[in-house]
Image: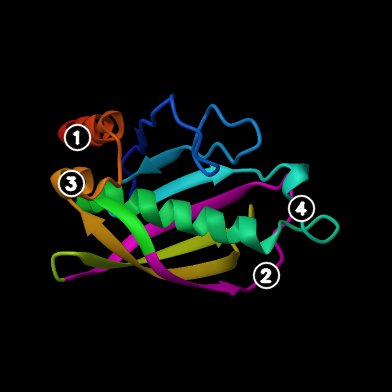
Amino acid sequence: MESEKAPKHLPNREAHYCFGCSPANPSGLQMKFYTQDSSVYSRLKVPDHLCGWDRLVHGGVISTILDEIMSWSGIYLLKQITMTKSMTVDFIKPVYINSDLKAEGKVLEKIGRHEALLEGSLYNAEGTLCARSKATFAIFSPAVAKRLGIAREEHLQWFEEICEVY
């Protein structure tokens, strides 16, 4: 449950093309992220061109929303770079295109130094749980990410700025 504390907007980078969160990708979801400290959430509407059957959001898009919210939860709450290792999705209720949705992610458990278990939930405008996911994420420090070639220097600089501010 969200606290009464005012939500904090988590700034995104402008110069990237991520399908889930890039503000520059006109075909993507353009998710924006907020926190009230124990979780990260995003409010969004899925556009028509991402439908599956008739007016329903494609299951792959629902999975992407959940993956994205969990990843941002790991970035913000763990102050680590995250990469999905495995993920399960439960599709509970239909999700409709162009409807108000809320995605919420939280860290369930840090598993050693290099993994974490996260949970993502997708709710409709009435607050009904429509989809849920659990995932194991690999977590990296910026130094390890740089050494492994996972992220370019400008991405790592953005990440370090986010961690300093929040």
N-terminal label among 3 and 2? 2
- Residue under pointer 4: 51
Residue 147 image label:
3
Place of residue 154 in the rendered image (x, y in percent of width and height, measured from the top left):
29, 28
Label 4: state its secondary structure. Answer: loop
- Residue under pointer 1: 160
Query: Is 68 on the left or on the right of 25, as rendered?
Result: left
Identify the magenta region: 85-111
- Amino acid type of disc 2? Lys
Q: Give me the C-alpha separation between circle 2 and circle 4.
A: 15 Å
- Asked whether residue 121 is in view, the answer is yes
N-terminal label among 1 and 4? 4
N-terminal label among 1 and 3? 3
Q: Badge 2: few (under 14), some or many (20 or more) residues near its Cα, within 10 Å?
A: few
Q: Quadrant of the N terminus?
A: bottom left
Q: Badge 1: few (under 14), some or many (20 or more) residues near its Cα, within 10 Å?
A: some
- Residue under pointer 2: 93
